[in-house]
Amino acid sequence: MMGLPLSFAQPLLLLGLLSLPVLWWLLRVMPPRPRRVDFPPTRLLLEIAPKEETPARTPWWLTALRLAAAALVILAAAGPVWNPQTAGSSGNAPLVLLIDDGWSAAPSWELRLNAADQLIAEADSARRAVALLPLSAATREASLQPGSTARVALRQLSPKPYAVERADALPALQRLLQSIGDAELVWLTDGVDSGGGADFVSGLARVVQQRPLTIMEGAPPAHALAAADNNAAKMTVKVLRAGGGAEAGSVRALDQKGAPIGEARFAFTAQERETETSFELPVELRNDITRLEIASERSAGAVHLLDKRWRRRAIGVVSGSSADIAQPLLAQTFYLTRALGPFADVRVGERGAVQQAIGQFLDQKLPMLVLADVGTLSPELRDRLKTWLEGGGVLVRFAGPHLAKSDDDLVPVRLRRGGRSLGGSLTWEKPQSLAAFAADGPFAGLAVPKDVTVSRQVLAEPDASLPAKSWASLADGTPLVTGERRGKGLLVLFHVSADMRWSDLPMSGSFVEMLRRIVDLSGYTAAPGGSGNGETTAETVAPLRTLDGFGALGPPPATAKPMAADFRGRANADHPPGFYGVADGPVALNALTATDQLTALDTSPLSARRTSYGTGEPNDLRGMLLSAALGLFVLDAIIIALLGGGLSMLLRRRSATAAVLITALAATLALSSSVALAQGKARNTPPKSPVAKTAATDDAAIKAVSQTRLAYVITGNADVDAIVKAGLNGLTLFLAQRTALEAGDPVGIDPAKDELAFYPLIYWPVVAGAPKPPQEAINRIDAYMKQGGTVLFDTRDAIEAPPGANGEAQTPGMATLRTLLSSLDVPELEPVPREHVLTKTFYLLRDFPGRFESGQTWVETLPRGDDDDDGAARPARGGDGVSPIIITSNDLAGAWALRDDGLPMLPMTPGEPRQREFAFRAGVNIVMYTLTGNYKADQVHAPALIERLGQ
């Protein structure tokens, strides 16, 4: 309405504003103010004279006040709505919502959900079916569903931490439209084109055809980080955006524990799509940075993770050449420092003191050393270098006259022995060029320089392992670079010198890239792109912790797959952004690569109606307008009373009443003061000190661990809790009579508040229809199960199961249990097999009866011989093979429950003579199973072990 986010539900009622002039004329008349006359009768009779009075005119400002109140009533009756939702229509066709749910949608995700929720609500009120199609779900078939179901499904959506390929969702959309025919489409876009946007727009135009399409846009622009670089003086990172306009912000740097290290400001001009910010910090602090994030923006794109590849490694360079002093610009150290400088902190050893320089670098524990034409080393220093290599150091050696003449074993291959005058070198009449780099080596993917030639090299003795250790070769097949693993470290040899005497490789860009690849290997246990020794093994790294769409690190999803250690692409559905590999040396994968750009999505080729996201929820203004009108009417009544003199008369008549009210108020205040004083005295009573509370908590913990105790969950149902407590008391007594375990009294616990680690077994009686426990309690139970505890869930309703194969799962107790377990990380379950340890931990049992014997007992599925018993596949698996969860419906506690006189509390069903005895034996087996683990299973191997020991 006139450019304002305002609409009216009944706009025709606004015609009532035309009646305001008539109201003006009617409200102009006001009765005259009464004249005050004293009461004495004689005077009244004498001075009364018939007189015709004319009405007075109402003041114009009072009339305007009344007209304003009337106008507010008319506007309220018209149903004004501020910030209305305008994307939907009033047709009867189904509504299809296309939702951008990539990382760029995360900053405005709530805004997008609110808009979609409003659209679904309007469609539901018009009895229109709704289809949700997140553009990341390319393989999922969309279908129509009621509005209430669609709203539930909408709240289950979350942004993905990677860029979504929108075009992949077009086939699913086409199949949906072909099946439903006529439909109205609304595309809730984030306005960012991270690649393939034009293809999607053109494809959407073909699929939609003549159907009405609305594009909802205008969300706050998304920002992203890319291309972080830890150079010599500072760490820089690019800040990207797709929108325009001048703006500023900040980027924060965090360490591995999430502690802030620094903050840098960035600013965009009106036309800039990319800017850069930097952290000017000491290199030691920059090397601790593992996460860069844009402050006040939550998305995976606004987070840039860093691993050891972004650390500026301190590299020691030692030269054995004596020409460095005379010609420093032609020295080997000159080329090496220039090549390593962009991505490492180079420390050059003192000239002429090779042994001392190497010793100093070893004392400094540098991760990488470069020895340029260093010949013979002392035995002590050689031993230190070998130990350093075995511990994970990277040693890069360059050939030269000194190395060619020495007899050194700190090289990856045996060097050819020959004439000492040439030192094993070979001079050709025609220089040799480089061959293609090995596809499985550390230099894979590097372009081969055509202008680099080699005129001299140190030759390697040919043997069977030489091809596997060759990382780079010349055109004639002789090795140029060789390398191998030494323990955790890496030993590399360039068969040419580091200066221009033997080749012009140091002058090429390939020399820099080759050294960069080697530097990237320092600190890793395997080489990206190869095994470090040229073997054809492709290393993969499993997901460790991944980002969600909002940029928070967490456990990897089930769909995440391992990736190659040298993966350089952007994150996707199979490889979400995050850390991969081992915890002490993870590999970072980000949502964007260094070359990615963000552009605004161009939807102009589409024939569509365009609207923008509201800045807030739709707001009905009727209540506010009616309240304002009521206030004006009250003000009008007060003014009339003042002008007519009625207020002063009322005050005089009510003076006595006012005095009474004042007296009552004073008495009330006095009573309140006395109550407050009493409460203050109560508050002044010193509370328990934190030390006292801590001592009480410590006493409870000491009492819990001083003796083995069984625990049960307090349900709040007095009858159930009493039976369960009596049952566990009975089981504890039976354990003391039949076994060596003398357990303490059972303990009732609240999973949301009490410490669970003190108890090896927790009995949880499931009450049908009970509300689901709070998430805090669920999280604590989940942690308890993963740390080795066992929870026994008993639904106690086996007798209520309807007949049939799946009748037990249809009881009310099982339904409540399924609701409870829906938030727990529960492993795959199976009925207790005959060979399970639980059947023989103390007694030999075939089943586990309680008050009832028809229910099954479920435990974690045993790993088969051909299964991969992987911890990741079994996240809740307890220690020592103990199932973290046991489920039954036989009411074990009811069978164990005894009265004070030792007689059973509850009858058995069907009541076989030894059913209660077997119920107690089942309890003994369960307790022993949780306490001792799977040692009984190990005993099945005893005959084979004894036989082997006898041999």
Image (cartoon, rainbow, N blue to C red):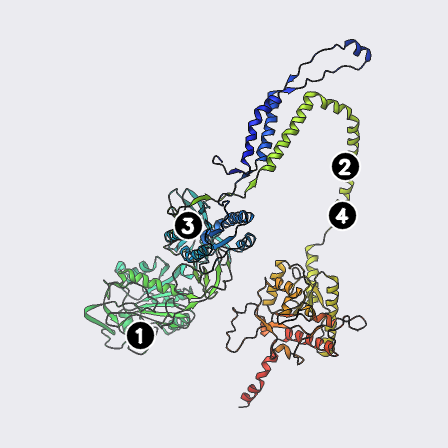
**Distance of mark 4 from mark 2, alpha carbons?**
20 Å
Which of the labelled discs sits on residue 467, or is there none?
A: 1
Other-residue count near label 4 (Cα within 10 Å), few / some / many at <14 / 14–19 / ≥20: few
State the residue position of label 2. 669
Badge 2: how crowded within 10 Å, few (<14), some, or many (20+)? few
Question: Which labelled disc corresponds to residue 86?
Answer: none
Mark 4 / mark 2, whichever is N-terminal: 2
| Between discs 3 and 1, the one toward the N terminus | 3
- Residue 575 vs 55, above or below: the answer is below
For image coordinates 78% across by 14% down, the residue present is 38
- Name the residue type under label 3: Val
Distance between the alpha carbons at the discs numbered 3 and 1 = 49 Å
Q: Secondary structure at mark 4?
A: helix
Q: In the picture provided, is 901 more to the left or to the right than 127? A: right
Q: Which residue position is annotated with label 3?
A: 192
Q: Secondary structure at mark 3?
A: strand
Q: Relative to 778, is 673 above or below?
A: above
Whether residue 319 appears in this view of the structure is yes
> Which amino acid lies under the numbered mark 4 shown in the image of this protein?
Ala
**Label 4: which residue?**
682
Identify the amino acid type marked 1. Pro
Which of the two discs, 4 and 3, labels the residue nearer the N terminus? 3
